[in-house]
Image (cartoon, rainbow, N blue to C red):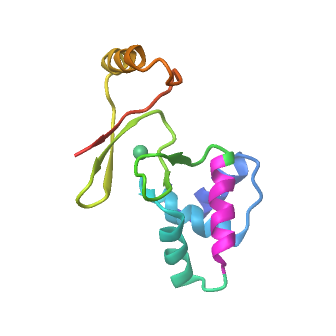
Amino acid sequence: MKTRAELVDFLKSRGLRISLPKLEIAAHIFKSHRHFTAEEIFREINAEYPKVSRATVFNVLNFFVEHGLLKKVEARSDVQLFDSNTEDHDHVVVDATGKIFDVQIPEREKLGFLEQIWANNPHLPRRHNASVVVHV
Ligand SMILES: [Zn+2]
């Protein structure tokens, strides 16, 4: 997704009303796959559009989450991260840098791993779409 026209079509195809903040925020988060905090996107948008408030940026991000264009990811305990990859996937977090990478653990191996965890910790909820976060 590169051009503004494509972004407009993208939002329209999902029945979403187009606004300048939505379009600018979409351009920032969908130009390449990334994990980010709301504050990071706010700073980027604010540099170009100082009139767009922090609340608007946060609201638009949550709006995108509600409409399945973004996912919240619990990969770091210190910040709430958003992920522009909405497919099921797992994460590797480099603790020294805070950088996060998408990884795909083969389904069978992941299930075996999760079954062990669930067997040893029966109090944990069993979610079929559980994701794995590895810290290195
Ligand atoms: Zn991810």
The quarter of the image that holds ligand 1 is top left
Is residue 9 among what the camera can see?
A: no
Give the residue displayed 40% in from the left and 13% down from the top. Answer: 119
Taking depth in this image into account, of 33 and 39 the one nearest to the observer is 39
Instruction: Give the tally of numbered discs.
Output: 0
Inspect this view and state whether residue 111 appears.
Answer: yes
* Side of 136 where 102 appears, left or right: right
The magenta segment: 52-65
Determine whether 76 is above or below 89 in the image: below
Looking at the picture, does residue 88 appear above or below residue 31? above
Say whether residue 56 is left or right of residue 102.
right
Main secondary structure found in the magenta portion = helix
Which residue is at a point 23% across and 59% down the rendered structure image?
96
Q: Residue at x 64, y 52 (%)?
A: 64
User: Residue 85, percent across and down?
Assistant: 47, 45
Q: Quadrant of residue 36?
A: bottom left
Q: Is residue 125 above or below residue 131?
A: above
58 magenta-colored: yes
Q: Position of residue 129 (x, y in %)?
A: 50, 26
Q: Does the magenta segment cover residue 25?
A: no
Which residue is at 51% across, 60% downward? 29
Determine whether 22 is above or below 65 in the image. Answer: below
Q: Residue 91, how many percent across, how many down?
A: 35, 41
Left or right, 88 with reference to 95: right
Q: Which one is in front, 125 or 109?
A: 125
Q: Position of residue 73 (x, y in %)?
A: 48, 46
